[in-house]
Image: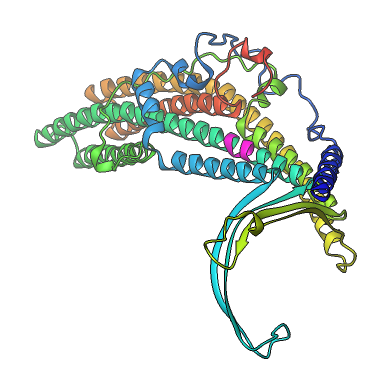
Amino acid sequence: MSARISLTVGAGLTVGAALLLSACSLAPRYKGPPSVAPVAQFKEAGDWLPAAPADTVPRGAWWQVFGDPKLNELEARLREDNQDLRAAVARFQQARALSLGARSSLGPAIEANAQATRARLSANSPLASAGPVTSNDFVGSLGLSWEIDVFGRLRNQAAAAADRAEARAADLAAVDLALRAELAMDYFSLRGADATLRLLEETTAAYDRAADLTRHRYEGGIAAATDVDQAETQLQDARGQLAAVRLQRAQLEHAIAVLLGLPPSNFTLAPAPFTGEPPPLDIGLPSKLLERRPDIASAERAVAAANAEIGAARAAWFPVFTLNAAGGFEATSTAAWFTAPSRFWSAGPSGQLPLLDFGGRAAVNRQARAAYDEAVASYRKAALTAYQEVEDNLAALRHLADEVKADDAAAASAQRSAYHADRRYAAGVADYIEVTSTHTAALQAQRSALEARVQRINASVGLVRALGGGWTGEQLQQPAL
């Protein structure tokens, strides 16, 4: 009895000392990756951008600022069946499961064992005494194995796994943001195609009437045969443009169906007007908003994981201590299996110290530090790319506003020119070449104005995505997610 007490007390002291030592960690103190030079103001913002943050709109539902009920309905359906989003959710769940698995290694592992064996001992074996012996062996036991994390290897591995799980959560948010932005851009492009179709349908109908009138004038000897050919050419060219835009709209509708997880054959989006005006946005403080981008959050978590992996790699130089214990019953017959004399137990620590591996651990340490440097570079590249995307979309909004203004003026001028050309042709003081050229220019100017409007509203969607989604003035005062 005294021996058992002594061993138990000794094991307890060993565990206590190991727990005190387990506070040690060889990972560098994490201070966050060095960022790019801070930016106080975006270069392309200028003084033209209206500041009107949508404080009543939740950050997650940024698309509501566009005020389109159909877009809101489509965005609400996106999360249900989009396959890219489901894959991202599955990747996050995998990372979270790995994190839980890594955390479980910090505690002891307990196993139950039961076995029944009948064996014959050879008469010529070293332990044989009186010829061959046949015997039974019944064992039932509990075993405990606990690696005492003295130098923080397991804790750093668990921390790295937790950081990677957080990175996958940020990746999930980034996929969600990207898909919603893609859906919004496809939707506005489709509405732009609707507006273009209406323009081309009206133009084609007008060209058809003009071609009929020209044929009648030719049959009456008033117009030349070349006028008829030019009118027919103009009509067929408009019909060709109409077919091309119908194809574009169909493909956009199919793309939206796939984003919603639906077969294109089972999805139809009815035509609707295109407003073409982006909502006012407040870009706020650049550095504060970029911290909210999920891809940058993912890159920062990758740096944290790489930092923890350095600690795990450095711990490989130091000894590994394990506490093992076992106890149970063993007998040669079932009748005596669970009796007091059949009890057995053992307990005690063990240690393993690496001595020589010909540079294997040194290589692992160099790899861990290089992985950290790579993660830092990836983080800085993500931040630089974020600044570029914001500047690009700000520049697009700024210059496309000028383009829309110029295209509208050009379209109005071209329509007036086409009107005067029609009057001059009817009066017999102009040929039909002037009519076709002015009408073609008017159609092209109107289409250019529509395309610029589509590009401008899509640039506003791109700006929202570049800034990490929607936000409010109050949220900018809160810590980054």
426 relative position to 104: left or right: left
Q: Nearer the viewer, residue 416 or 132?
A: 132
432 relative position to 120: left or right: left
User: Total marks drawn?
Assistant: 0
Q: Residue at x 46, y 21 (%)?
A: 63
Could you say where residue 146 lies in the image, as x and y percent from the top left?
A: 73, 49
318 relative position to 391: left or right: right
State which region is magenta.
Answer: 165-169
Q: Nearer the viewer, residue 368 or 458?
A: 368
Q: Nearer the viewer, residue 307 or 470?
A: 307
Please identify the residue farthest to the right as the structure is shown.
355
327 to 182, vertically: above or below: below
360 to 2, vertically: above or below: below
Could you say where residue 131 lies in the image, as x and y percent from the top left?
A: 64, 89
Residue 300, magenta (yes or no) = no
283 to 80, vertically: above or below: above
Could you say where residue 56 lies in the image, as x and y percent from the top left?
A: 50, 8
| Residue 111 seen by the camera | yes
Could you say where residue 109 lies in the image, as x and y percent from the top left?
A: 66, 49
Q: Residue at x 60, y 55 (%)?
A: 339
Classify residue 383 by image quadrant: top right
Q: Residue at x 64, y 49 (%)?
A: 110
Which part of the image, by quadrant, shows the C terminus?
A: top right
360 to 94, vertically: above or below: below
Classify residue 171 by image quadrant: top right
